[in-house]
Image (cartoon, rainbow, N blue to C red):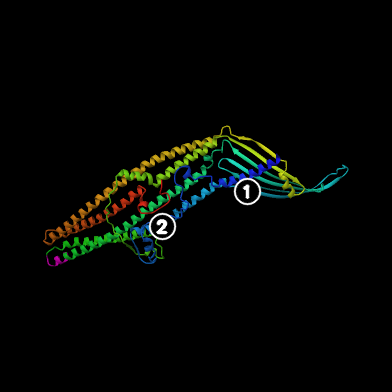
Amino acid sequence: MFKNLTVVLLQTILLFFSFMAWSCTAVKPPSEVMNYPAASPDSSKVFTADEIHKDDNTTELSKQDNQGPIEVGIEETVLMAMQNNQGLVVEKMNPLIQKTFEEQEQSVFDPVFGAGLSNKRSVAERLSRAGSATESSTVDTMDGSAYIDKLFPTGTNLSLLGSTNIVDSSLYSDKLASTRLGLTVTQAILQGADIKANTASIQQAWIDTRISEYELRGFAELLLEAVESAYWNLAMAERRIEIYNDSLTLAEKQMSEVQERIKIGKLAETELAAAQAEVALRRENLINARSDLAKAQLVFLQILNPGGNNMWDRKIVLKNQPMAPDVELDKIEEHVKVAMIKRADLNQARREVEKGELEVIKTKNGILPKLDFFITFGKTGYSGVFNESVKNVGGDSYDVVGGLALEYPPLNRQARALHHRAVLTKQQAIEAVHNLTQIVEVDVRSAYIEVNRAKEQISATAATRKLQEEKLRAENEKFRVGKSTSLLVAQAQRDLVASQITEIEAVVTYLKALVNLHRMEGSLLDRRGINTPGNRQ
């Protein structure tokens, strides 16, 4: 019978190590528990060349000199910004940092190994056996122990302990060695017995990683919108320079014509002041336009971050000029549906609800009494030497201890307060999702309206510009036959310049409105062929 108990102990030890190996993969990620995709295992691989489908732009960009002019189109600008922007480099680190918390939370179920070794000598005086005198005694004691503890998601704690004790006393001729091997199993019955509650912190860490990926996606969308806006703002600033240069040339030509007509006596000298004032105004506008262009270049370079020793002085050559694309929008309801799936902030809010559900499970478990069942089975071998004591562990001697341990604070106010707070926080997160859903829909609908308004403005401003051209032509003809004044001609020139500026601004506003609509519905990165973590609901 006792030998059978020894076999059972050895089998239990083997089962212990098998259980440890299984538990390393037993905790499932939230993707399996809560039915949504797991976080990307390698968030550092964001915005790689393979994930950005832009034909051969990568090769073309790599051939550009870091010191020479920057010649880019809108697609190459997007690619360079995604590769080089310093703000994005910083944000890309957040999912990697957050992922370390997953490992930290999983460490709760890591096995713990411990060992100890001590040596003790005692020298003392004692009454002799005859009782007539004292005698000295020297006792050398050596203790050694090693253990492995392992907590499992089921609330089971296994502890395997091996210890030895060797005593060498001058009072006895032989040494005494004892070796013990014991296994303790503790199983939570109430508090700590729920697998979901025990693994809630791990799942929350996984969700936090997913949230950080949604935050990264949101930042990337904002960056992409800023990149395209900076590109079109720069293109518009360059076009303004061209318009003001042309208007200055036209004003100078008009002033020369006025001067010639004054010389031949067809105009009064008072007409010259209006022409000169118009030239001065054109030069003033040109100075302001050049300043705006320089600022737009700085913003563009900062977002692009092309590198080079003299990055801020590099010349920029834009391949694409503002042109209104022929785009037919879907119905507004379709854009709203896309936003409900793709918006990063909305998906982030949904993950917060899932975190709240896990917190409720975890704190509800904390309200329960702590009731544990435990059993310890051990065998001890004795001998005069260590080796023999180890062999004798398989002998007939053994010990078994079992029982229950109960712990419960009568009021338990802390646990109840934590659970109540978790319930309220979860409800708050649910209401936040409802509120954000409305905000997202308003954002999409407002952006949709703005796109349609901007599109209509393109044709309206083009018509205005054509009428202003005709108005200027008519004023010039009237001026040549003496039926108009240089002031009216200058006013017509000024109106034409304003209409030309408004026309190009309308095109750029439309382009930027399209980008904003796609960002508001959360599809901007997908439409540009850019793959990021957090691109699924």
Residue that badge 2 annotates: 50
Q: Say whether disc 1 or disc 2 marks the residue closer to the N-terminus.
A: 2
Q: Is residue 154 left or right of residue 493?
A: right
Q: Image height check: is 307 above or below 198?
A: below
Q: Nearer the viewer, residue 40 or 182?
A: 182
- Residue 520 in percent (x, y) is at 35, 47
Which span of residues is magenta-colored?
258-265
Judging by the rendered image, the residue that carries numbered circle 1 is: 113
Residue at (53%, 37%) from the top-left corner?
365
Give the mark toward the camera: 1 or 2.
2
Residue 302 seen by the camera: no
Marking on residue 136: none
Residue 264 is one of the magenta-drawn residues: yes
Tell me the SS state at disc 2: helix
Distance CA(mark 1)–CA(mark 2): 45 Å
| Residue 327 part of the magenta segment | no
The amino acid sitting under disc 1 is: Phe
Q: Quadrant of the C terminus?
A: top left
**Residue 55 in which image quadrant:** bottom left
- Amino acid type of the residue tagged 2 in the rendering: Asp
Residues under numbered marks 1 and 2 in contact, where contact means CB atoms less than 8 Å apart:
no
- Looking at the rendered structure, the secondary structure element under dot 1 is strand
In x, y percent, where is residue 356?
47, 40
- Would you say residue 341 is visible in this rendering? yes
Whether residue 207 sits left or right of residue 140 in the image: it is left
Image location of residue 14, percent across then percent down: 62, 45
**Is residue 153 rendered to the left or right of residue 446?**
right
Most extreme residue toward the top is 410
